[in-house]
Image (spheres, rainbow, N blue to C red):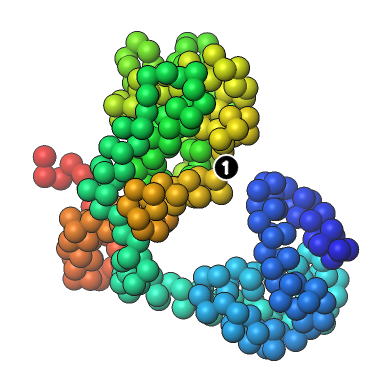
Amino acid sequence: MEIIKKFEEELIKEELKPKTIKNYISDLNTVLDIFDYTINFINTPQETIKILKDHYPNVKTLATKINIIIMLLKLNYKDDEELQKCNKEYLVFRNQLKNENEEYYKQKIANPKQIEQAMTQEDIEKIKSVLLSRIKYATKNRVNIINIRNYLFFAFITFLHSRTDFIKSKLVLDKPKNKYDKDTNYIVLNKRELSIKYLQNDYKTAKTYGSKSHDINNETFKLFIKLFNAYKKLGVLGGYAFYQNDLIKPMNSDNASKLFHEICMDILGKSVTIQSLRIAYASSPEDIEAIERINKKSNQMGHNLQTHTGIYMKTNMNK
């Protein structure tokens, strides 16, 4: 379809990452499908917004679909004055949704689905124990390599409680002459210290926070070495840490989310997402109590939480 082709060309000109472009094209296709792939809907913002609200009761999802219309008008029809007037209406509505979303998250109340999907530390230990029990000694067996991968994947994500940026990491041995690409993530195995380091260069907020280095729980070191050697023996190419079941294509974020869900369904018998794992980790009673104490202090002092922690809190005052 010509409109999609032109939109993709404009996105490429914006120098966006291929994955981002793919996601935007997918969102555009979803919206176009609702309107039977006709484009006239962009001329009637109020009617279009009403239809999309009926389709997407979730504020965040609705905002994503409105945003794709805004981008479409901005990129494909930047010289059309009438359509740019329409775009202002979409922008106003998107800002309203943003404010609603912010108010929702300020409530700090988990919805029923988040409560249902909550994962406890006992759940994590149970899954790790079952996954570990499935690993046999032989590493020439493809099934066993997948079992090792599954355990390391789960151990890694529940140690960091991160997004799935790590999933396309390169797996390397630590050597003095190593040169690390600033746009690639690495899991680095140090045989001298029997330690693991995760070099995080490519992730969602990298432009804001820059490269990071994480020391990883060394209990997985031997299995990572076993996996590294197994890949070498089988001639697995690419140097990645995590491959799909064919041991040819590296895993991606979609594979990771699906694998995490399958592992939890298999062992716990319930649906758990990576986001719900992160929410549960961030919502420990100790952390909630600490935030409430700091919030109370910041209110007393007449400023917000960010000002309190960023300007007034000093780590060495009581030493």
Residue under the point 48% across and 46% down: 259
Q: Nearer the viewer, residue 268 or 70?
A: 268
Residue 136 visible (yes or no): yes
Quadrant location of residue 49? bottom right
In this figure, which residue is indicated by the disc labeled 1?
252
- Which residue is situated farthest in the right direction here? 2
- Which residue is situated farthest in the left direction here? 319
Image coordinates for residue 20, horizontal then vertical, percent? 65, 52
In the image, is 111 to the left or to the right of 58?
Answer: left
Quadrant location of residue 89? bottom right
Q: Nearer the viewer, residue 75 or 190?
A: 190
Q: Quadrant of the C terminus?
A: top left
In the image, is 319 to the left or to the right of 143?
Answer: left
Residue under the point 40% across and 33% down: 152
Image coordinates for residue 248, horizontal then vertical, percent? 63, 30
Image coordinates for residue 292, horizontal then vertical, percent? 20, 65
Element marked by disc 1? loop
Quick check: 213 above or below 124?
above
Density class for disc 1 (Cα within 10 Å; few <14, some 14-19, many ≥20) is some
Residue 278 visible (yes or no): no
Q: How many marks?
A: 1
Residue under the point 45% across and 16% down: 174
In the image, is 316 to the left or to the right of 92?
Answer: left
Residue under the point 29% across and 26% down: 219
Amino acid at dot 1: Asn
Quadrant location of residue 30? bottom right
Image coordinates for residue 272, horizontal then vertical, percent? 39, 56
Q: Quadrant of the N terminus?
A: bottom right
